[in-house]
Amino acid sequence: MRVALDATPLIGIRTGIGVFVAESLRSMRAMKQEGVDLEIATYTLSVGARLRGKTQGVWVPIPAGKAPTVWRRFKGPRIEKFVGEVDVVHGTNYLVPPSIHPRLVTVHDLSFLHDPVAAPAPIARFDRAVRDAVNSGAVVHAISNHVADEIRDRYEAPDVRVVYPGVHPRQPEERPKDPSPVLVTLGATHRRKGLNDLISAFELVGQLNKKVELHIIGPAGDDEGRMNQSVRQLPASIASRIQRIGLVGDDERDRRVADATILVHPSHYEGFGFPVVEAMALGTPVVTTTGGAIPEIAGDAAVMVEPGDVDALASALVDVLADEQKRAQLIQTGRDRAANFSWAETARGLVDVYGSFL
């Protein structure tokens, strides 16, 4: 079985989508080494990657931002023109090219509908791209049941398959914990991630706990400026305990999460919620929200509050910081929960979907 797979998300800063593509590819290639009849032909939709010599697989000379319009208007070019004959085509990031063979398109979330003001224009265009894919007969892969239900409701998609992503954190070396409690949050500072809620909640927590710190890890997003302004408006005694760490490597990220007292994920909406599962796997208690798919993914292994409820978020953080027994319980249930998500299972699930087309 030969599969054409979009590797464009591997270029540039590695987001959750990039992690999904990289780990799925790695695990599917491992299956081939174990004797599974599978060949992956990767392709890249990026002129910039071509110019920088960073193409993953075969270069398709259509910019990702223009591809939906080109494919809609001209019904081509078919992906076989670039990668040769295949049995299945997998668009891993909302877009799937024309083909005479079965096509699968991965939809990671519908965040562009939940916060259309904050969504960059290229992401907003994905709404039309997903509708085009469904209307042209592509099967949809959703990364959670929550996203699958949203897709069925909005696009009337007749065939949506759910395959969860996995988690594969590197276990940091055992180190003594900092005596001062540390809250850590991961991810780009996009508005839907709820960072301003967390800043407001931290002001309340910091008034009660004079040692607690907040570390914000991840690249700048569309709400970076507003978040920085919120921090500047805090009392100096609170603001001085907030560290904007930015983007770090995988090893340092995992170490910081493992060393933290609590992972806080105040997101208003998630299609899956990688930081939640990664923290659980690393043995860090999680306080998060009920936004999107988070309850489905976290189960009973996290403390959850309604998105945007600053008082409830602050109260939950104060309670978990003060209750060592509760933290120990969350660590154990979190590890058990995270064990349900593996990249090997993701690869097997995707290969099963591919095989169902033949």
Image (cartoon, rainbow, N blue to C red):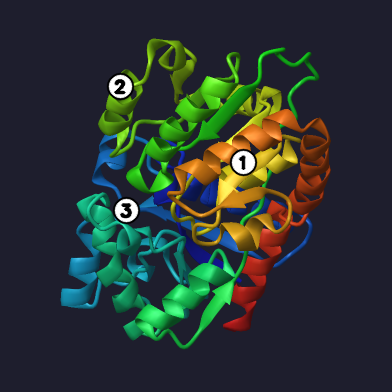
Percent position of residue 34, x then y? 79, 57
Q: Quadrant of the C terminus?
A: bottom right
Q: Residue furthest left?
A: 73
Label 2 residue SS:
loop
Q: Which amino acid type is marked by label 2? A: Gln
Percent position of residue 63, x then y? 23, 53
Q: Which residue corresponds to the image point at 57% horizontal and 57% vertical from the top-left?
A: 294
Q: Which residue corresponds to the image point at 50% horizontal and 46% vertical from the top-left?
A: 16
Horizontal side of 258 relative to 7 (left or right) equals right
Question: Which residue, given by chain and number where applicable, does mark 1 sit on?
Answer: 316
Q: Mark 1 or mark 3, which is nearer the start of the sequence? A: 3
Horizontal side of 72 relative to 18 (left or right) equals left
Q: Which residue corresponds to the image point at 67% horizontal and 73% vertical from the top-left?
A: 352
So how many labels did they put on this image?
3
Marks 3 and 1 close (CB-CB < 8 Å): no
Viewer-nearest residue: 137 or 316: 316
The residue carrying pointer 1 sits among few (fewer than 14), some (14 to 19) or many (20 or more) residues within 10 Å by Cα, namely: some
Q: Which residue corresponds to the image point at 42% horizontal and 33% vertical from the top-left?
A: 200
Horizontal side of 130 relative to 118 (left or right) equals right
Label 1 residue SS:
helix
Question: Which residue, given by chain and number where applicable, does mark 2 sit on?
Answer: 233
Residue 61 visible: no
Q: Which amino acid type is marked by label 1? A: Ala
Residue 48 visible: yes
Question: Which residue, given by chain and number where applicable, does mark 3 sit on?
Answer: 45
Question: Which callout, 3 or 1, points to the residue nearer the camera?
Answer: 1
Percent position of residue 67, x then y? 24, 62
